[in-house]
Image (spheres, coloured by chain):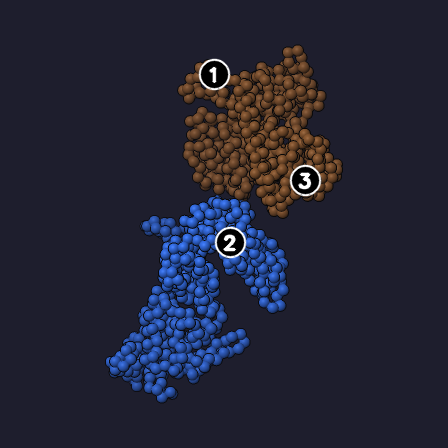
Chain colours: A blue, B brown
């Protein structure tokens, strides 16, 4: 028996969503077979079998949220039926047709204490918050049992073992101290869900947040867009009763559009088909993360955008002149991005605040130039990093960007490849954008918005001439970058783009 | 004397034997003392079970006699053999009491025959066929049940003036039978003998039958029973039962006074109720005091004396076998340190007449008394397809739910087989279901349970089939 656990997913990644299992329980698997894909807010990770054997148990079903180290599945010896470990009862139907029927099943298993963890120094007690698990419910190791609120943080008490929550020793509102036993888990009591088919379906169906509600309460919730997980159930074992749901609706716990009001539009929409007018789809973790981080950036930084424009004639000319030789020597085409990266590095060196970040009451200056390059991928926007761009040649940068872009498209970017940029370039031009105001990629302090190259009439030496022009936008954190610095930065970028030789001469 | 028990239970009825089984299951060293030769208490020996055997047999007879023709079945020379009926009843009782004995054995409970008496803390003396012994125990559970409440001035001889016990053993069908008391037990026993040919008169002190039952249901029941041949003399007080040469003369007067009237009878059944049976139990040895009615008070089954517990008819609550059973189970769990609990708001009551009467939860009168706002849903079996097909349309379902939360508060039914159907509503009450929850739960068609669903819809005014 080998446990398949959630691997390390990189720093700052604490949990992942289980994707589709490629094998069913009982299937034979070979070493390095991809068992399942885990989706995190940054990357998708493939979990592989580390040996030949039989997939004897899937612990985390598709759609479940799992934490680092949590058990995903159990692989049995190739062909071997059972090694008799109690929690795996469910896994060997051929060995014992109805193992859980024995009354011992519910008694079996040691009681394991779940203790209040340390909550940080100087925190000696906390208040018990909402219980996340009912007594008698199956629990997995590291699953959060209950929240403890302190004046500083809210911590979750993790479940020490797989099993069944046997007892709770404190109720919501009680005061507890680190080390207190707050619950006891009957180890291996996972036998309970294995007893019949229905609970298995239940585990598959949802996360621990699965709300027990009476049929009428479910109806009321649906009609009023009420989130039942936020309604306190006073029915048996915490079920949400009709009275609970009615009370919640009355107290306004519903979304701003109650069911009663969608009526006003029917006349106008009389011609419409009967198709549902809206559809609800769960946000992917990536989307959720994008949403959260963008909003955090807006809420934190004092974002301001300055604009300029660049005449791209010189770069276009250089590409035309040297493209063949460049491809022949480096095997990649000379694109625009490398010029922009170099131009930005040069400007960052001159205006170090744009390459810095705020950490508390300190400014962290970076002596390295790691350029985030925003690229779109089928799963959404990702920002892989071209590291130490200051030490790279144009060709190296082009190669790196192609490599990262390919990985992004295939969903193969690693966490490392997406962390730690000091500045970001975002090219909305490839989609046709003429002008935009990018949002900072926190905690960075600057982001360059590139746009579409468009031939425009411009005045040059008193003459109106047609030039390939690009508007440039620099969004910056005005908390540490002054207006003068931001404008100067963008002017430097403009100058370097219009006269790339400046890069060569380092001026 | 050599061993100390964890639990010694005095009484082997539904409260006692279920307590014993659960205690045994939980690994407690348990003894169950029963003074009868057989286990099962009043319920199994002289109550629920034998009465159901006779009720079923007599109902089959009456159905053949009166209802078969309506279904196109002709019966010639229909007759019954009372002694065979009685024999069948005894066999049923025998089989079931032996079953209880087996269950105790299976769960390693020592069954001790004799009359138990508490002689001190942790000490129970048993006066059995082989003399007296004293058991030592950590916990004592009183489960001695109840006995028939006597009527002052009337001596029960179990020959002509009988209690429910004697009424189950009559040698022949009385021509004239008088029931003193219009409660559940009387109406069931009266039904048995009426079906077999007795002319039954029911004398009741109150102005209604089945006190405590929902008034509307009781009224409908009375109408149906009257149609069946019962004669009701309500608001009438029995002042004496005199034995005459050819039977009994029962003298009465109006409950309000005056207006005397006497009734002749072959047999009179005294069924005015039951009272806790604690005589000779030695409560005084541990300082337990009963209330005026002889009831032993308890808090989570614990009496005022440490280590002494009480369940069933001799403590508060309805005197019902399943209530005693629930308490016995929960009490054993508490003794074992677990969280045994009984929900007294969801204990059903069934009257096994034909049609049956069943209820659970609050009655309309109780809700009015509490000042609680409620809504009512009703549905008559007249409009139920299965009842129509079966020619069993007497009766109705009535549900009471909270006016605001729609939570089910009470269910009251009269109709064929409603004693089985009530269990659905017990589950609903236990889960704090609303009328809508029941209305939205699929019920099989065609069954009489559909009437429950229609009544549930009726609570919020959307009954669909009436």
State the separation of the CA atoms marked 2 and 1: 64 Å
Question: Residue B359 at x, y = what percent?
Answer: 55, 33
Asked if marks 2 and 3 touch (Cβ < 8 Å), the reply is no
Crowdedness near tag 1: few (<14), some (14–19) or many (≥20) residues, C-alpha within 10 Å:
few
Instruction: Name the N-terminal-most of marks 1 and 3.
Output: 1
Q: Disc 3 designates what residue?
A: B140
Specify the quadrant of the image occupied by residue B140: top right
Residue A209 appearing in the image: no
Indicate left or right for A144 with A446 as reference: right
Work out how far the residue at label 2 is from the one at label 3, CA to CA, in angstroms: 36 Å
What label does residue A188 carry, if any? 2
Q: CA distance from mark 1 to mark 3?
A: 53 Å
Would residue A401 be visible to someone looking at this image?
Answer: yes
| Residue located beneath label 1 in the image | B78
Say if labels 2 and 1 share a chain. no
Q: Quadrant of the C terminus of chain B?
A: top left
SS for callout 3? strand
Farthest residue in the top direction? Answer: B245
Locate residue B133, reporting x and y percent.
Answer: 70, 35
Residue at image point 58% right, 55% down? A183
Q: Residue at image x 39%, y 62%?
A: A51
Residue at position x 46%, y 37% in the image: B462
Note whether A176 is above or below A476 in the view shown: above
Instruction: Give the x, y percent position of residue A337.
Output: 34, 77
Q: Residue at x 59, y 44 (%)?
A: B26
Image quadrant in which the N terminus of chain B is located: top right
Could you tell me residue B301's position as x and y percent?
Answer: 65, 41
Tag 2 subunit: A
Q: Nearer the viewer, residue B270 or A265?
A: B270
């Amino acid at each position: 028996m080998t446990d398949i656990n959630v691997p390390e997913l990189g720093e700052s990644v604490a949990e992942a969503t289980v994707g589709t299992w490629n094998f069913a329980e009982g299937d034979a698997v070979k070493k390095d077979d991809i068992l399942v894909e885990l989706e995190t807010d940054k990357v998708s990770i493939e979990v592989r079998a580390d040996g030949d054997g039989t997939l004897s148990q899937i612990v985390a079903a598709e759609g479940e949220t799992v934490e680092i180290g949590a058990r995903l599945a159990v692989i049995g010896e190739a062909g071997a039926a059972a090694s008799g470990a109690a929690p795996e009862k469910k896994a060997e139907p051929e060995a014992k047709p109805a193992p859980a029927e024995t009354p011992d099943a519910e008694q079996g298993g040691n009681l394991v204490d779940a203790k209040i963890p340390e909550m940080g120094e100087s925190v000696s007690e906390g208040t018990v918050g909402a219980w996340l698990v009912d007594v008698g419910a199956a629990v997995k190791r590291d699953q959060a049992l209950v929240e403890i609120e302190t004046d500083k943080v809210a911590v979750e008490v993790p479940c020490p073992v797989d099993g069944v929550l046997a007892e709770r020793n404190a109720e919501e509102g009680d005061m507890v101290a680190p080390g207190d036993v707050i619950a006891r888990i009957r180890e291996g009591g996972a036998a309970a869900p294995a007893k019949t088919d229905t609970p298995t379906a239940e585990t598959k169906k949802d996360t621990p947040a699965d709300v027990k509600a009476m049929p009428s309460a479910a109806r009321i919730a649906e009609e009023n867009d009420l989130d039942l997980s936020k309604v306190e159930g006073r029915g048996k074992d915490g079920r949400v009763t009709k009275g609970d749901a009615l009370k919640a609706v009355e107290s306004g716990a519903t979304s701003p559009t109650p069911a009663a009001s969608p009526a006003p539009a029917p006349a106008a929409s009389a011609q419409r088909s009967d198709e549902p007018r809206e559809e609800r789809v769960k946000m992917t973790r990536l989307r959720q993360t994008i949403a959260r981080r963008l909003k955090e950036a807006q809420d934190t930084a004092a974002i301001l955008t300055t604009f300029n424009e660049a005449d791209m004639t010189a770069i276009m000319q250089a590409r035309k002149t040297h493209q063949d030789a460049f491809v022949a020597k480096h095997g990649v085409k000379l694109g625009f991005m490398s010029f922009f990266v170099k131009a930005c590095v040069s400007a960052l060196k001159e205006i170090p605040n744009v390459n810095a970040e705020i950490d508390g009451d300190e400014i962290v200056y970076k002596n390295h130039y790691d350029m985030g390059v925003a690229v779109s991928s089928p799963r959404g926007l990702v920002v892989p990093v071209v590291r130490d761009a200051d030490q790279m040649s144009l060709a190296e940068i082009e190669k790196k960007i192609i490599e990262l872009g390919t990985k992004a498209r295939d969903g193969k970017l690693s966490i490392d490849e997406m962390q730690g940029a000091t500045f970001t370039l975002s090219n909305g031009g490839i989609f046709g954008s003429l002008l935009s105001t990018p949002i900072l990629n926190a905690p960075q302090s600057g982001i360059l918005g590139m746009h579409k190259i468009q031939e425009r009439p411009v005045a040059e030496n008193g003459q109106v001439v047609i030039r390939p022009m690009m508007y440039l936008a620099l969004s910056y954190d005005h908390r540490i970058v002054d207006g003068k610095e931001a404008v100067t930065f963008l002017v430097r970028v403009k100058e370097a783009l219009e006269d790339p030789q400046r890069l060569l001469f380092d001026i | 004397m050599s061993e100390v028990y964890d639990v010694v239970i005095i009484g082997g009825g539904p409260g006692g034997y279920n307590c014993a089984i659960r205690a045994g299951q939980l690994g407690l060293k348990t003894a169950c003392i029963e003074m009868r030769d057989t286990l099962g208490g009043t319920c199994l020996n002289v109550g629920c079970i034998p009465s159901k055997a006779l009720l079923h047999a007599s109902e089959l007879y009456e159905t053949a006699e009166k209802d078969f023709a309506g279904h196109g079945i002709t019966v010639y020379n229909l007759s019954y053999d009372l002694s065979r009926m009685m024999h069948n009843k005894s066999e049923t009782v025998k089989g079931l009491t032996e079953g209880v004995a087996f269950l105790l054995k299976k769960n390693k409970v020592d069954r001790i025959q004799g009359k138990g008496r508490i002689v001190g803390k942790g000490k129970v003396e048993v006066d059995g066929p082989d003399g007296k012994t004293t058991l030592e125990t950590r916990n004592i559970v009183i489960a001695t049940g109840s006995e028939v409440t006597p009527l002052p001035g009337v001596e029960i001889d179990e020959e002509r003036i009988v209690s429910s016990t004697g009424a189950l053993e009559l040698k022949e069908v009385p021509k004239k039978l008088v029931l003193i008391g219009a409660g559940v037990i009387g109406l069931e026993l009266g039904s048995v003998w009426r079906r077999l040919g007795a002319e039954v008169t029911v004398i009741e002190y109150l102005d209604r039958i089945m006190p405590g039952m929902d008034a509307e249901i009781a009224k409908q029941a009375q109408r149906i029973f009257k149609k069946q041949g019962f004669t009701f003399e309500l608001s009438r007080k029995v002042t004496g039962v005199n034995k005459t040469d050819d039977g009994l003369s029962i003298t009465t007067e109006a409950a309000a006074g005056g207006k005397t009237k006497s009734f002749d009878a072959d047999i009179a059944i005294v069924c005015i109720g039951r009272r806790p049976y604690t005589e000779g139990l030695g409560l005084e040895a541990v300082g337990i005091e009963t209330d005026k009615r002889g009831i032993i008070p308890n808090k989570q089954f614990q009496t005022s004396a440490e280590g002494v517990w009480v369940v069933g008819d001799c403590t508060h609550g309805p005197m019902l076998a399943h209530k005693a059973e629930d308490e016995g189970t929960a009490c054993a769990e508490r003794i074992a340190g677990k969280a045994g609990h009984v929900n007294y708001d969801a204990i059903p009551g069934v009257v096994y007449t034909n049609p049956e009467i069943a209820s659970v939860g609050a009655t309309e009168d109780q809700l009015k008394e509490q000042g609680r706002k409620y809504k009512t849903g009703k549905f008559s079996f007249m409009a139920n397809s299965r009842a129509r097909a079966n020619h069993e349309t007497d009766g109705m379902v009535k549900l009471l739910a909270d006016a605001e939360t729609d939570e089910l508060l009470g269910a009251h039914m009269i109709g064929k087989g409603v004693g089985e159907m009530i269990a659905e509503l017990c589950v609903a009450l236990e889960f704090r279901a609303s009328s809508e929850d029941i209305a939205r739960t699929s019920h099989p068609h065609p069954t009489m349970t559909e009437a429950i669903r229609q009544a549930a819809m009726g609570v919020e005014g959307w009954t669909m089939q009436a």
